[in-house]
Image (spheres, grey):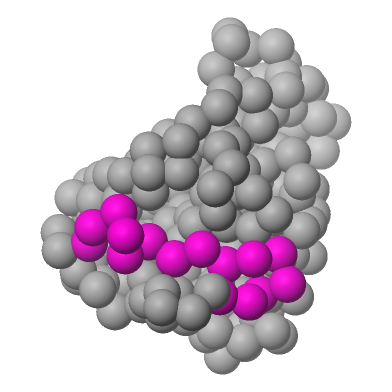
Amino acid sequence: MTGVTGVTGVKRVSEKALRKEVIATALSMSRSGLTAGRSGNVSCRFEDGMLITPSGKRYEETEPEDIVFVAADGSVPKAQAKPSSEWHFHLAAYHARPDRSAVVHTHSTHATVLACAHKPIPAFHYMVAVAGGKDIPCVPYATFGTEELARHVAAGLKDRDACLMANHGQIALGKSLSYALELAIEVEVLAEQYYKVMSTGAEHLLSDDEMRKVVEKFKSYGKNTELD
C-alpha cells in the first residue's frame, strides 16, 4: 500500500489523506443523522482494492491506521483491524461500477422504512433521477455480510448510483466520498418525501420518457453533477 491514488481517479491523494477522509465522511454521516451509533460504513477505492471503515469501532475513536485495506480479491493484509462486515458489497459495487470510487452505506430512517416494506422509490419527483435512472430500486434481502447480498447490491447498482436493500438500508455511490455522502443524504430526503406522498393516497408518477429527459439534463447540470 505504498502508492497513491485519488478517489476520483484524477486527483492524486496520499493514502493517509484518504484514510482521514474516510473517517471524516463516516463522522459526517453519523452526525447528520443518516445512521446511529456504529451502524453504516464508508469506503473509497485505493490501489487495486479499497479502504473501508473497521468493524464495530466508534467513528469518534477511529484513527487513520484503523481504516482497513481490502484487496480486489477480498484479502486483508495481516496486522490490520477487521474490516466492516459489509466489505463484500462494497467490493462488489466497485467491481460493478468501475466509474465510481466511493461508497456510503447507511440505515437512514425513511430509506430503511421503505426498504423494510420492499418498496423502491419511483418517479414521484424528478430528483429521483439524481441516482441515474427512473427510480431508486430496492434489491432483495440477504443476510448482512454475505456474498449473496453483495450480488444483489452489484445488480442494483449496475446502472444506478443508489439503491435500497430490503430489510436493511440504503447504499450510495460517488466519484468521491463527498459526492457519495451527498447522494446518501438526497436519497434519505427523497425517501421521506415519498413516504409522506404515499400517506396521501395520491401518487402521480412521472413517465419514463420524462425521466429519461431529466437524466439527460442532469448530465450537463453544472460541473458537480455525478451523472456525467
Residue 76: x percent and y percent?
Answer: 56, 75
Q: Quadrant of the N terminus?
A: bottom right
Q: Is residue 165 magenta?
A: no
Farthest residue in the left direction?
A: 60
Residues 122 and 57: in front is 57
| Magenta span main SS | loop
104 versus 54 height, above or below: above
**Segment tinted magenta in the rendering:** 62-76
Asked whether the viewer can see residue 98, the reply is: yes
Q: Residue at x 66, y 75 (%)?
A: 74
Residues 62 and 14: in front is 14
Q: Residue at x 59, y 42 (%)?
A: 3
Q: Is residue 70 magenta?
A: yes
Residue 66: x percent and y percent?
Answer: 31, 65
Residue 15: x percent and y percent?
Answer: 46, 43
**Which of the 4 image quarters holds residue 10?**
top right
Q: Quadrant of the C terminus?
A: top right
Specify whether 112 is left or right of 62: right
Q: Residue at x 75, y 32 (%)?
A: 211
Specify whether 68 is left or right of 164: left
Residues 115 and 123: in front is 115
